[in-house]
Amino acid sequence: MRLVLLGPPGVGKGTQGRRLAAACGWALISTGEILREAVARHSQLGLEAQRQMEAGLLVSDDVMIGLVRDRTAQEDAGEGFVLDGFPRTVPQADALDRMLAERSLKLDAVLSLTAPEEELVRRLTGRLECPVCKRTYNVEGVPPRDGRHCNDHPEVMLRQRADDTAETVRRRLEVYRQQTAPLVDYYAAGGRLREVPGTGAMDEVFGALRQAVGCVGPARAGG
């Protein structure tokens, strides 16, 4: 099964996407990871992506589409994949459909995780990071043992990341609404959208995602 995972910052796409892919035996394709891997390999697309990022530019659609094309063609994606971070715009969504159609494949479903804005702001402003190892915590979901210091570096005080202040979080959510939220209407019009509430216990959300795509058997390793 080939899926796209949509949702605003803080809704839990990264965590839930990884669990879903592991439980159902699909590849998790995160655009952040494939960008880092392509840059590290010094591939042609990776070098071009690095050039654009170092120039302060967004990675172009052509480069992102090329990276996704290469990654979805790898052997581990043969049984299916979960795409996290792509597409971000309707033109990218059109390109993904064309890319899959070239291989006589199609996108089976789009899972949209939802949560109220105030909940997302509360989650993101509750994140803390160790300045030494970059391990992240959340005061609600995954708190440090003593509430203030890194578990692995007990002498180091955790701090809030600069992009996790309430003002910055609200700006990120506004960018999401303007650029990526139109994909919800795009996929709904095609009958591929399945909305899942991203609130409640993590295991409850995970169970709802599995139910939405029919992956309800025993969890595999990592799920």
Image (tube, grey):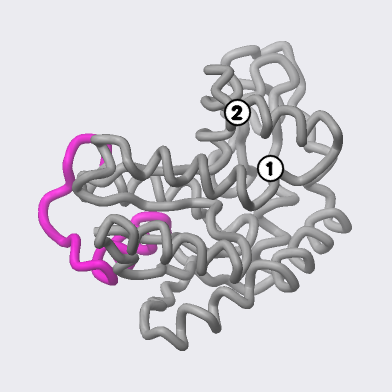
Q: Earlier in the sequence, mark 1 or mark 2?
A: 2
* Label ID, residue 46: 2
Residue 185 placement (x, y as % from top left): 55, 83
Whole-percent x, y for residue 160 in the image: 79, 37
User: Where's the C terminus, which quadrant?
Assistant: top left
* Magenta residue check for 208: yes
Q: Is residue 50 above or below residue 90?
A: above
Q: Residue flagged by tag 1: what amino acid is it?
A: Arg
Rendered image: mark on residue 171? none
Figure quadrant of the N terminus: bottom left
161 with respect to 152 (left or right):
right
State whether residue 12 is above or below residue 64: below
Total numbered badges shown on the rendered structure: 2
The amino acid sitting under disc 2 is Gly
In the rendered view, would you say 163 is above or below 195? above
Taking the spot 24% from the left edge, 35% from the top edge, the residue there is 75
- Viewer-nearest residue: 132 or 80: 80
106 with respect to 214 (left or right):
right
Q: Which residue is mark 1?
A: 127
Q: Which residues are magenta?
A: 201-223
Q: Residue at x 53, y 71 (%)?
A: 114
For the residue carrying disc 1, how many other residues have a C-alpha within 10 Å: few (<14), some (14-19), or many (20+)? many
Instruction: Point out the residue furthest to the bottom here.
Output: 189
Q: What is the C-alpha distance between the residues marked 1 and 2? A: 30 Å
Q: Secondary structure at mark 1?
A: strand
**Residue depicted at x 84% and y 49%:** 165
Q: Nearer the viewer, residue 122 or 174?
A: 174
Circle 2 SS class = helix
Residue 216, given in percent of the width and then of the height, sits at: 16, 61
